[in-house]
Amino acid sequence: MKKMLFILVLLITTSVIFHANAQTKNNNDYDFFDTVVNNHNQIFPVSGIPSAIEMVLKYCKAVDFNFYDLQLKWQNKTDGSFRDFDKKELYGITFSQEFNLPRDESFPMDSLFQTIENELKSGKKVIIALQVETGWSIFLVYKKTPDGEFVSYSKQGSHTTILRNTKEIVKKSNGTEIMTYSIPPHM
């Protein structure tokens, strides 16, 4: 009986230690979707651009998760664009507007997609304007799928929209513009 009790205690202790280690590991993983996107809100209907920039700043750990200063300043500004943040350094991160070109058959689609892919390979996300059913919305390109498509996230309030056909949407729009960013080596 003592031997069975000892084995039971040993199994429970091992299970508790294993579970605690697994929990610690999961909490230390810095997953973009779980850590940044799920904990962020777009607080105004037309604050998509500053909202996306805030998510990048949070992802880069340049600001804390309660940071909404850019959206609070922007609010429902309807005449804003990526141009408002082009070449701007915010909390040590410099943002750049790219592919601000006419959306027509001459748009350099392959170059756009290669730029996005290069940014993703370097561990960054890309802010992108996508034409969806309700008009143009701002998304963050999160990753490239094995079949070559891009997955993008957007927020509207606390609701997260996930698109798994970003390239298809861009092609239907004859192009789009993006924002990339540079991080100093010390961050």
Image: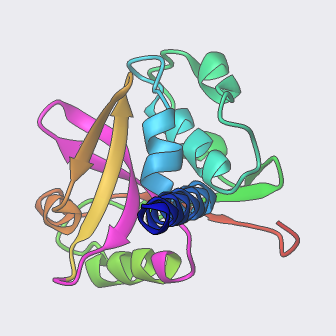
Q: Residue at x 38, y 60 (%)?
A: 141
Question: In the drawing, does residue 133 fall left or right of residue 39?
Answer: left
Q: Which residues are magenta?
A: 120-147
Horizontal and vertical percent for residue 83? 58, 45
159 falls in the magenta region: no
Q: Residue at x 58, y 62 (%)?
A: 17
Relative to residue 77, is residue 95 depicted above or below?
below
141 falls in the magenta region: yes
Quarter residue 75 falls in: top right
Relative to residue 62, is residue 126 depicted above or below?
below
Relative to residue 33, is residue 75 depicted above or below?
above
State the colouring used for the structure image.
rainbow
Horizontal and vertical percent for residue 21? 59, 64
Relative to residue 148, is residue 52 depicted above or below?
above
Image quarter in which the C terminus is found = bottom right
Question: In the drawing, does residue 179 fall left or right of residue 87?
Answer: left
Q: Farthest residue toward the front?
A: 1
Question: In the drawing, does residue 170 fall left or right of residue 97?
Answer: left
Q: Nearer the viewer, residue 129 or 62?
A: 62
Q: Residue at x 59, y 51 (%)?
A: 56
Is residue 125 visible to the viewer in this orientation of the structure? no
Horizontal and vertical percent for residue 49? 49, 38
- Kindly report the secondary structure that dominates the magenta region of the rendered protein: strand
Image quarter in which the N terminus is found = bottom left
Q: Residue at x 73, y 38 (%)?
A: 64
Q: Nearer the viewer, residue 180 or 165?
A: 165
Quarter residue 164 falls in: bottom left
Is residue 137 visible to the viewer in this orientation of the structure? yes
Question: In the drawing, does residue 185 fall left or right of residue 163?
Answer: right
Horizontal and vertical percent for residue 96? 62, 60
